Image: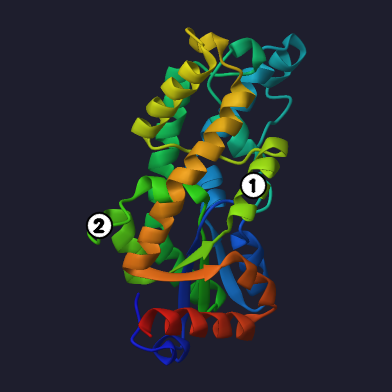
């Protein structure tokens, strides 16, 4: 959705916005604030981790539990129940399932298995995007919400073409929501890398990019075997590499089909009215 003037957006009886950008720039924080101001909060990563990948995640837990004789016997007799406690703020179950490639003795996955799980995530993310129109309708009809915010993970940009208006995911987003890019700074990027070291988030690469970065990492470190790779080291290095690759793609999506605000502007938002003021400025900046 693009608007000739800010008032064209502000005066609508109902609002639907998709926020996107790199992990940690404030998408979920903003969405949580708006939820307290009577906005429906749709979390893309939560939808992926529950509706579309929940069974994969729980089966992985069970697979590990079956390696322990005590737990194996309890599982096979249906004496215990294992589930995933994924939340909007805690995506650890999804991150753990996706894992990182490398030395299996250090918790790494064979590259082929990592790629298989990456493909599961790609399919799940596109499905979550396609669910947005249904949830906009559901939010109104079931719960009475007029306003809707879709909080999408950083990997959104990996499953669509930001320059193609007819891309299925792009078309769904732009036809049903206003696209809002929350743009971080270089300082934000450095902080995100350090945060990722401490608490990894779900990581998805475009298939060709993953192969390129895997080969590049092994060459930089003189590794000849996949099992030489330290999974945690590749995960952090890969996060920084993919972050730099995504930034111009985020901006292209916003330039073509949406609007841009800076991450620091999120600190000015306390409620619905503050967000509307922020949107007024973002739309005015594009049309001026």
Disc 2 secondary structure class:
loop
Q: Earlier in the sequence, mark 2 or mark 1?
A: 2
Residue 99 falls in image quadrant: top right
Residue at 51%, 83% in the rendered image: 281
* Alpha carbon separation for disc pair 2 and 1: 30 Å
Does residue 72 sit above or below 287 in this rendering? Answer: above
Q: Which mark is residue 98?
A: none
Does residue 104 sit above or below 216 in this rendering? Answer: above
Residue 265, x across and y down, in percent: 62, 72
Can residue 210 be spotted in the picture? Answer: yes
Viewer-closest of 86 and 166: 166
Residue 228 falls in image quadrant: top right
Q: Which mark is residue 190?
A: 1
Residue at 51%, 11% in the rendered image: 223
Does residue 156 sit above or below 177 in this rendering? Answer: above
Residue at 45%, 38% in the rendered image: 121
Does residue 51 sit above or below 273 in this rendering? Answer: above
Residue 110, x across and y down, in percent: 49, 16
Residue lying farthest to the right in this orientation: 70
Residue lying farthest to the left in this orientation: 166
Are the residues flagged by discs 2 and 1 in contact, CB closer than 8 Å? Answer: no
Residue at 46%, 29% in the rendered image: 117
Residue occupied by mark 2: 164
Q: Quadrant of the N terminus?
A: bottom left
Q: How many marks?
A: 2
Can residue 178 be spotted in the picture? Answer: no
| Left or right relative to 282: residue 249 | left
């Amino acid at each position: 959705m693009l608007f000739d003037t800010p008032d064209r957006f502000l005066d609508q009886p109902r609002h639907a916005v998709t926020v996107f950008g790199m992990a940690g720039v404030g998408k979920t924080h903003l969405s949580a604030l708006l939820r307290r101001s009577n906005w429906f909060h749709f979390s893309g990563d939560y939808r992926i981790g529950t509706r579309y990948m929940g069974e994969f995640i729980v089966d992985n837990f069970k697979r590990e539990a079956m390696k322990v004789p005590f737990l194996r016997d309890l599982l096979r007799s249906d004496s215990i129940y294992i589930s995933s406690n994924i939340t909007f703020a805690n995506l650890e179950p999804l991150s753990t399932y996706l894992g990182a490639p490398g030395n299996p003795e250090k918790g790494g996955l064979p590259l082929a298995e990592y790629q298989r799980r990456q493909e599961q995530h790609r399919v799940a993310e596109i499905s979550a995007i396609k669910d947005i129109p249904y949830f906009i309708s559901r939010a109104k009809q079931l719960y009475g919400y007029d306003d809707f915010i879709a909080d999408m993970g950083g990997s959104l940009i990996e499953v669509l073409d930001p320059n193609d208006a007819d891309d299925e995911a792009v078309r769904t987003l732009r036809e049903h929501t206003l696209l809002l890019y929350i743009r971080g700074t270089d300082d934000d990027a450095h902080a995100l890398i350090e945060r990722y070291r401490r608490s990894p988030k779900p990581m998805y690469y475009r298939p060709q990019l993953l192969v390129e970065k895997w080969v590049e990492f092994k060459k930089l470190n003189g590794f000849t075997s996949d099992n030489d790779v330290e999974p945690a080291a590749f995960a952090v290095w890969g996060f920084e590499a993919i972050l730099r690759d995504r930034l111009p793609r985020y901006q292209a999506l916003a330039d073509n089909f949406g609007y841009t605000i800076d991450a620091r502007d999120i600190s000015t938002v306390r409620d619905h009215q503050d967000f509307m003021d922020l949107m007024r400025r973002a739309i005015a900046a594009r049309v001026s």
